[in-house]
Image (tube, rainbow, N blue to C red):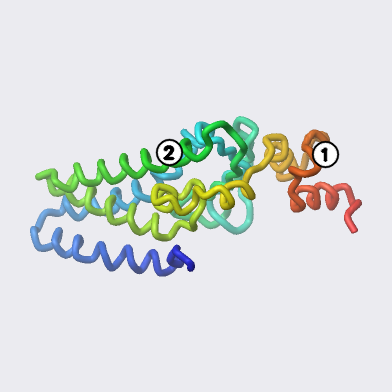
Amino acid sequence: MTFPISHRLAWRLLAALLAPVVLLALRTGDPTALIGILPGVAVGLVFPDVWTLLFHRATGARLVIVRYGSGRRLASATFAGVPVEIGLVPSAELTLFIEITPVPWLRPRLWLNSAALLAVQLGLGALLATHPNGFARELGISLLVTTVVINLRCHPAPLSPLWTVLGLTLRRHQIEHLLRHPDLVRAERHVIRGQIGEARRLLDLVPASARVNVTQAGILLAEDRYE
């Protein structure tokens, strides 16, 4: 069974659910209420990315690369060893490529991370939605709607809040095949940055049983040794 809805359907669903909110704001004649919708949607889109950037290491996750936008690469940099790229075409969200590394109490960490993220988003949205001020009220409602739609759009993965809280992504066989050796994650970062010698050195530290074919293939291709 495929749980997530498509990207296009998610935006259509978001627009359909926010339409009554817009009509209500127009009917009340409060322009500040209408203005609150866009920030609510923006917070709903950006907050999960910011949360992940702040707390991913506590769950055992490691960032491989962070990208914003699509198309031709305009700029690139490295922060704390993580490659960051900016594309020509702007987008509403960051793209975070994440690997899960083996750490003690992995499943409880992942569950608590997702539960806390949902609790903060939904709690803040509900609190603002009951505010008498029109701007705060519409911001809260749009935040709640955006949070629900975005979570329905996410693919079941260890850092997908809704599916993780419901326990659909924490089964042993679903987690184990996703685990990556920390040195393998570092090697992938060096491949992205074009530092093949350093990537090869780190790959040699990874046990053969823990290596991922795509990382090995990338290094061999860069060394012109892949057949």
Q: Callout 1, which amino acid?
A: Arg
Residue 110 visible in the picture: yes
Q: Is residue 10 above or below residue 126?
A: below
Mark 1 vs mark 2: in front: 2
Q: Is residue 38 left or right of residue 164?
A: left
Amino acid type shown at disc 2:
Asn
Quick check: can you spot residue 135? Answer: no
The location of residue 198, given as percent across then percent down, is 80, 35
> Residue 6 at what x, y percent from top left?
45, 67
Of pointers 1 and 2, the one earlier in the residue sequence: 2
Q: Residue furthest front?
A: 172
- Is 160 situated left or right of 74 in this image? left
Q: Nearer the viewer, residue 151 or 172?
A: 172
Residue 27 spot, x, y in % from top left: 10, 63
Toward which corner of the image does residue 207 lie, by quadrant?
A: top right
Secondary structure under badge 2? Answer: helix
Mark 2 closeness class: few <14, some 14–19, many ≥20 residues within 10 Å: many
Label 1: state its secondary structure: helix
Q: Residues within 10 Å of mark 1 (few under 14, many from 20)?
A: many
Q: Say if 185 sits above or below 10 in the image.
A: above
Residue at left 75%, top 48%?
Answer: 215
> Which residue is the site of mark 2?
113
Q: Position of residue 31 (x, y in %)?
A: 15, 54
The residue at the point 21 percent across, 46 percent down is 126
Residue at x 44%, y 49% (from the top left corner): 164
Q: Nearer the viewer, residue 62 or 129?
A: 62
Dot 1 and dot 2 residues touching (CB under 8 Å) = no
| Residue depicted at 33% across the width and 55% down the height | 148
Separation of disc 1 and disc 2 at Cα? Answer: 33 Å
Q: Which residue is mark 1?
A: 200
